[in-house]
């Protein structure tokens, strides 16, 4: 199945969003790169996904991130034991930290209006609200991921101070051009390699 998400960059003073269509079997690690391209981030910074609603149920403290984070199995043996012993652990809102390469979108986005927050750069704290708007049949003539609509520019890397001081104008009336530029990235062979790998400079 294909998930249609509306991804909105929060707290930037104007509407900045992207409408993205993504295969439901995409991992959260792959979604990270899809969002990098959609919002013109470079990948210098840490990130995580904070799940807020799954299967229509609100979540609190369910986080997914890169493997360099601390999985729940290491951070809290008590919570791990509880999850192993509960017959339906998904019914209990237990905090956990899961590895993005192992979690698929379909594991968490179950129905329309399920949502998550993608946080990029823990210093500038760019928060993107991800809302599942539609679940679609794949179009045999389409290539995924696919950006179908876009609104305004995203700020450049490390620009929170410039944005807050009013030195940065994100207005861009040409949403069609933004959409085309994003899709051009997605169609480029090896496009994920264009983003920084933090292991290269840590």
Image (cartoon, rainbow, N blue to C red):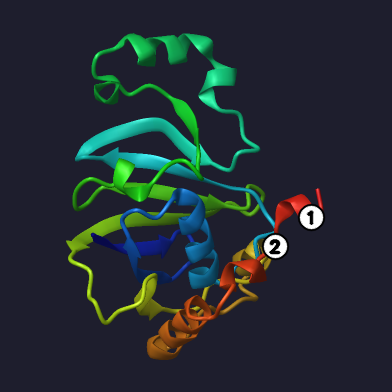
Question: 81 or 6, which lies in front?
Answer: 81
Q: Residue at x 35, y 69 (%)?
A: 20
At x 61% / y 68%, what residue is drawn? 163
Instruction: Point out residue 117 in the picture as x, y percentages from the top left corner.
Output: 42, 48
13 or 51, which is in the foreground?
A: 51
**Is residue 202 depicted above or below 139 in this figure?**
above
x, y percentage for residue 80?
45, 15
The location of residue 92, given as percent across then percent down, is 29, 20
Q: Residue at x 63, y 47 (%)?
A: 122
Asked whether the beta carbons under mark 1 and mark 2 sit within 8 Å of each other, the answer is yes
Residue 47, image x, y percentages: 58, 49
Residue 38 is labelled as none
> Looking at the rendered structure, which numbered label has been put on residue 200?
1
Residue 1, image quadrant: bottom left
Q: Residues within 10 Å of mark 1 (few under 14, many from 20)?
A: few
* Camera sees residue 15: no
Give the vertical position of 138 relative to 75 (above or below).
Answer: below
- What element does badge 2 sit on? loop
Q: Nearer the viewer, residue 71 or 164?
A: 71
Residue to which mark 2 is pinned: 196
x 31%, y 55%: residue: 24
Left or right relative to 28: residue 66: right
Q: Would residue 186 be seen by someone viewing this image from the given angle? A: yes
Mark 1 vs mark 2, CA separation in Å: 8 Å
Say which element carries label 1.
helix
Is residue 28 left or right of 146 when viewed as pictured? right
140 over 41 or under it: above or below: below
User: Is disc 2 surrounded by few (<14), some (14 to 19) or many (20+) residues within 10 Å?
Assistant: some
């Amino acid at each position: 199945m294909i998930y249609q998400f509306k991804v909105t960059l929060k707290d930037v003073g104007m509407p900045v969003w992207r409408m993205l269509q993504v295969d439901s079997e995409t991992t959260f690690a792959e979604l990270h790169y899809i969002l990098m391209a959609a919002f013109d981030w470079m990948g210098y910074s840490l990130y995580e996904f904070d799940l807020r609603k799954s299967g229509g149920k609100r979540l609190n403290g369910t986080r997914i991130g890169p493997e360099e984070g601390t999985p729940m199995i290491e951070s809290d043996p008590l919570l791990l034991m509880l999850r192993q012993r509960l017959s339906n652990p998904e019914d209990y809102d237990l905090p956990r930290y899961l590895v993005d390469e192992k979690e698929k979108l379909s594991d968490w986005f179950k129905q329309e209006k399920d949502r998550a927050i993608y946080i990029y750069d823990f210093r500038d704290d760019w928060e993107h609200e991800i809302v599942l708007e539609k679940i679609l049949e794949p179009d045999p003539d389409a290539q995924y991921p696919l950006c179908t609509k876009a609104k305004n520019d995203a700020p450049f890397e490390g620009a929170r101070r410039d944005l807050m001081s009013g030195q940065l104008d994100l207005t861009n009336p040409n949403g069609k051009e933004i959409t085309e530029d994003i899709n051009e990235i997605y169609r480029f062979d090896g496009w994920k390699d264009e983003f920084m790998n933090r292991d290269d400079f840590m």
